Image (cartoon, rainbow, N blue to C red):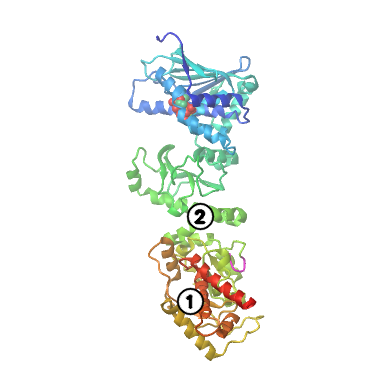
Amino acid sequence: MTDTESQQFSFKAETKQLLNILAHSLYKDREVFLRELLSNASDALNRLRFEMVTNHNVLDPSAELKIHITADKDSRILTIQDTGIGMTRDEVIENLGTIAQSGARKFLDATRDQKVDFSQVIGQFGVGFYSVFMVAEWVRVTSHSFNPEAEAVSWFATGDDSYEIGPAEMSERGTKIEIKLKEDAAEFAEEYRVKNVIHKHSDYIGFPIYVGESKEAVNKQTSLWRTSKQEVTEEQYKEFYRQTTLDFEEPLTHIHMSTDAPVQLYALLFIPSKAERGIFSLRKDDGLKLYSRNILIDEYNKDLLPEYLRFVQGVVDSEDLPLNVSRETVQSSGLMPKLKKVLTNQVIKELENLAKNNAEKYHTFWQEFGVYLKQGVAAAPADADSINPLLRFKTNLNPEAWSSLEEYVSRMKEGQKEIYYIVGEDPKSVLRSPHLDYFHSQGTEVLLLTGPMDSFMLMGLHKYKDFDLKNVAQADVDTSKKPKEETEAERMPESDFGGLVDQFKKVLGERVTDVRASNRLVQSVARLADADANTNPELQRVYKYLGKEYEIPKKVLELNPSHGILKNLLKLELGSELQNIIIEQIYDSALLVEGLHPDPSSIAPRVQQIIEAALTRKTG
Ligand code: ADP
Ligand code: MG
C-alpha cells in the first residue's frame, strides 16, 4: 500500500446499522447535523489551543482559530472548515471509521426506546459525526494535522458499508468537511438557513463562525450561562438541559443567575422533574459542573450545594476561582462556602417562588423531592428556617391535599397552641389510629406523617414560628370537653372494668407496662400510650427503619370503658380461651395501627380462630 492511492475500508457492523438508519429514515430535526459538526470543530479548536500552550512546533501557528462555512446553492455543497487540531491518516481511520463502535451500539439501543428524540442526543453517544448522513449524499473530510510533519488525508463515504481513505491536497492546518446535500436537504445550502441553525443550536461556541464572505462572526461566542437572561429563550434552556443531562423529561424549572458580590459567579441550574436519573443519563453522580472562566474544572462538584439539594443539576462558573487548580486548592481557597451560600439561598428562593406562583407544579416537585428536604430538616438545622416553609403535609382534615405549615397555622382553632401530628405507616391506616379519636371528635387538624423520612425529619422539626410540634399520642388533651354530637355511651361499671383490666394484665404480662382506662377514646377500643412522657416515639421508629436491634417498646395499654366490644368481652367466661385470644388480638391491633408490629402476618391464625368462634356461636 502506498500513500498515493485510495484505499477502501469497511465500517464495522454496528456503524453500518447506524448509518443505514440515519440515511434512510426521515427525521424532522435533521438540522442538528450542523450542530454536531460545529461541536466537533469547536472541540478540535480547543484541543489545538491547549496544544499550543506547551508546543510551539505547530503548523500555521498564527492562523486565526475559527470556523468557516460556505454554502453553494447550485451544487448543493456545504463546506465546514476549521483551523483546529486536524487529523493524521491513522487518526481519521480511528475516529471516523472504527472507534464509534460502542457508542453506535448504545445509540441504537436508545433509539429503540420510542420516547427518545434521538436527534437531540446523538452527539452524546460519540457518534455525532455520523448524523451528517441524514442530509448527505456523500461526505468528504479533508484534514491536515497540526503536526508539521504530517500529510493531508481525505476520507470519503456515501453512507453505505465502506469508506475510502486517500491522500489530499491541503496545505493549511485543520479539517474541512464537504457535504453533498441530498435533494430534499437543499435548504442547508442556503446561507440564511445555515445562520438560523447556528443561532438556534451553536450560538455559544467559543470560536467565531463565519458564513460565506462575511467578516463578521454569526455566533455570540459565549456560553449560555454567561449570556444575559433576556437573551435566552425557554427552548434554549431546555436544549441545554437535555444536552448536559440526557434527561428526556423537561426540567421542572431553571435558575439562571449572575452575581458580583460577595462572590462573582454565573450559574445555570435546573430542577429535574424526576428524582431518578434515566438509564441513558449522562450524569453518573450528583454534583454540579464547576467552571472557572468558562473552563471545566470539576464535573461533579458536591460542595456547591448542601446535600439535601443534591438533586439540582447544572453549571456554576466563577471568575474568582483560580485557574488551573486542583480540587484540593479549590477546597482550601475559602471561596467554596461563599459560593455555596449564594447558590443555596437562590435555589430555596426559587422553590419558594414556585410554591407561591404555581402550587400544582410545586406539588409535583414535592412528591419527587420532598424526601430530600425532609432530610435537610434533620441534617441541616441551621437551614430550618428556610426549609420549613417548603414542607408539605397531608392532614386528617385534608387527607388528599398538600398543606404547608403556614396553611395549617392559619386554620388552627382559637386557643390551639400546638401543631399536632401523628406518625404512622401509611396515610390510610393512620387515619384509623385511636390517637386521633379525640382530635377527630374536636375537629382539630393533625398532620399525617407517614413517609419513611418523616421520623428523621421530626428529629429536627420541633417548632414552626411560635408553635411547638406535638405528637398526638403524647399530647395532653382536655377530656372535660366532650365531643359534641357524640351521644355519650355508657361506661361499664368500675368493678367490672377492674376485673377486665386484671385479665388483660394476666394475658399480656410483660408486654405492657400497665393497663388502664382512657377518657380520650371514642370509636377505638384501645390505644398504646407511652409509659413515660419523655420517650421519643420518633426515635423508636428511626431505629426500626435503620434496622437497629429493634424490640417492641413496652407501652401502656389504654382501654375505652364505654366500648361495646369490651362490654361484650366481659360477658365471656372469665379466663376462657376465646376471651384470651380476643385480648391478644386487641393488643396486636393496637400495635398494628401504631406501625410497630414486628410480624403482622402472624396475626392471621388468631383471626381465623376468632372467626371460627363467631361462626359457631351464630350457627350453634
Ligand atoms: P465525539 O465528538 O463525541 O467524539 P463524533 O462522532 O462527533 O464523536 O466525532 C468522532 C471523532 O472524530 C472526534 O472525537 C474527533 O476525534 C474526530 N473529529 C471529528 N470532527 C473533527 C474535526 N473537525 N477536527 C478534528 N477531529 C475531528
Ligand atoms: Mg462530536
Residue 7 at x, y = what percent?
Answer: 45, 12
Q: Nearer the viewer, residue 309 or 316?
A: 309
Q: Nearer the viewer, residue 356 or 323?
A: 356
In the image, 427: left or right of 66?
right
Q: Main secondary structure of the magenta part?
A: loop
Q: Is mark 1 within 8 Å of ligand 1?
A: no
**Residue that label 1 marks:** 529
Q: Nearer the viewer, residue 593 or 229?
A: 593
Total numbered badges shown on the rendered structure: 2
Rendered image quadrant of residue 565? bottom right
- Identify the magenta region: 394-398
Where disc 2 sits, the SS reads: helix
Say which amino acid is labelled 1: Ala
Question: Does residue 561 show up?
Answer: no
Examine the rendered structure and indicate whether residue 170 appears above or below residue 279. Answer: above
The N terminus: image quadrant: top left
The residue furthest front is 620
Residue 348 numbered tag: 2
